[in-house]
Image (cartoon, grey):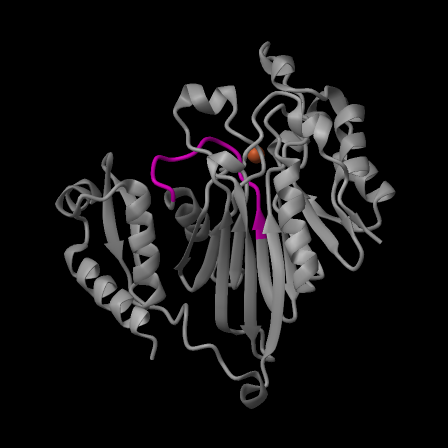
């Protein structure tokens, strides 16, 4: 076995021992002199070795919560021997086209990578466009595209179009503002004009990928301080008979993955830089996507699951007004 993995395992075991149930993460961070982001990495490491530990909010304090280990990441199965089906997809969310902080050039990067990998399906978890908010006077200044026609026209003209790739999407809270204001539905025109973009539903949809049930969700409301809290709550309210194997959540502009109630939950990051609203509210904003590799059996049970998080650094962002709008061309492969 690779020596590096041995060392990782050693540290995962060590850190895990100090993560007592209901103990504060602040104490842990202080003890090991780690930042919150470093703690997220440690939690990820623990999960890689089957140590399922999460951070939840309890009476205003962020604490550790352990649950029984799940076989989340097991040894990669041998496809020939086990007769498993391998599915690879890209998951994106919250592109907010029309916002001055949109990052279309980064969306193009992950689509190009998906194309190179031979991926055929991309799932988009909502908020394709930035929407219209008549009761927010600052809103027009935050956008370079105003109203339904401009924003939806931009999706039709600019959304990546790569031979062999279909994007299946749900609509989110920002998309819905067009319906609330003008009874105009984003999907109506996007899917009419783009045969490679299939609409699944407003706010949520269930899809079946080679027998694996996936629930796509775009909730409303604000974020919690704890990254995992909202995702955990969304999984908690799922009826036992309805539980999917994978749950993908947009809207929060965060990045997180964990297993809870035997559901593999992914909080999907966004493709829009931090807005004035987020800055004022002190909210974090994560830009990136997930490549998912799923090995499932004939009954649709997942035997191996690998969520590959792709995150972009602040240097990758084009936050100067108009740069993304003016410099980016539509990514097309015919
Ligand atoms: Fe959003
Ligand atoms: Fe949203």
Which of the 4 quarters of the picture holds residue 58? top left
Q: Is residue 264 left or right of residue 128?
A: left
| Residue 248 colored in magenta in the image | no
**Looking at the image, is 129 positioned above or below residue 112?**
above
x, y (%) of residue 266?
A: 48, 52
Residue under the image location 21 percent in, 60 percent down? 16
Which of the 4 quarters of the picture holds residue 51? bottom left
Residue under the image location 43 percent in, 34 percent down? 223
Residue under the image location 33 percent in, 49 percent down? 40
Residue under the image location 55 percent in, 43 percent down? 250
x, y (%) of residue 110?
A: 62, 49
Q: Quadrant of ligand 1?
A: top right
96 or 107, which is in the foreground? 107
x, y (%) of residue 21?
A: 19, 54
Find the magenta span and give its range.
Answer: 216-227
* Quadrant (top left/top right/bottom left/bottom right) for the C terminus: bottom right
x, y (%) of residue 332?
A: 79, 47
* Quadrant (top left/top right/bottom left/bottom right) for the N terminus: bottom left
**Looking at the image, is 264 positioned above or below residue 205?**
below
271 or 146, which is in the foreground? 271
As drawn, the residue found furthest toward the top would be 137
Q: Let me know if residue 203 appears in the view.
A: no
């Amino acid at each position: 076995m690779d020596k590096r993995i041995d060392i990782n395992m050693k540290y995962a075991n060590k850190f895990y021992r100090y993560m007592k149930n209901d103990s504060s993460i602040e104490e842990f961070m202080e003890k090991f002199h780690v930042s919150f982001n470093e703690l997220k990495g440690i939690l990820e490491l623990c999960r890689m070795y089957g140590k399922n530990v999460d951070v939840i909010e309890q009476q205003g304090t962020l604490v550790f919560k352990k649950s029984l280990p799940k076989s989340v990441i097991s040894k990669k199965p041998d496809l020939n021997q086990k007769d498993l089906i391998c599915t690879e997809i890209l998951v994106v969310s919250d592109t907010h086209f029309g916002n001055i902080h949109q990052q279309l050039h980064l969306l193009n990067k992950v689509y190009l990578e998906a194309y190179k990998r031979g991926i055929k399906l991309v799932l988009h978890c909502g908020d394709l466009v930035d929407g219209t908010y008549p009761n927010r006077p600052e809103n027009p200044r935050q956008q370079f595209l105003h109203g339904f026609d401009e924003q939806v026209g931009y999706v039709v003209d600019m959304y990546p179009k790569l031979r062999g790739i279909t994007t299946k999407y749900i609509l989110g809270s920002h998309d819905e503002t067009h319906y609330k204001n003008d009874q105009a539905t984003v999907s109506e025109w996007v899917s009419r004009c783009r045969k490679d973009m299939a609409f699944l539903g407003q706010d949520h949809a269930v899809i079946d990928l080679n027998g694996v049930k996936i629930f796509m969700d775009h909730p409303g409301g604000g974020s919690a301080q704890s990254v995992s809290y909202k995702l955990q709550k969304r999984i908690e309210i799922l009826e036992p008979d309805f539980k999917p194997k994978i749950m993908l959540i947009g809207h929060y502009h965060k990045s997180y993955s964990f297993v809870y109630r035997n559901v593999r939950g992914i909080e999907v990051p966004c493709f829009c830089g931090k807005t004035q609203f987020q800055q004022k509210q002190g909210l974090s904003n994560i830009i990136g996507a997930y490549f998912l590799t799923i090995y499932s059996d004939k009954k649709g049970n997942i035997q191996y699951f690998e969520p590959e998080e792709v995150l972009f650094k602040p240097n990758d962002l084009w936050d100067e007004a108009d740069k993304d709008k003016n410099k980016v061309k539509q990514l097309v492969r015919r």
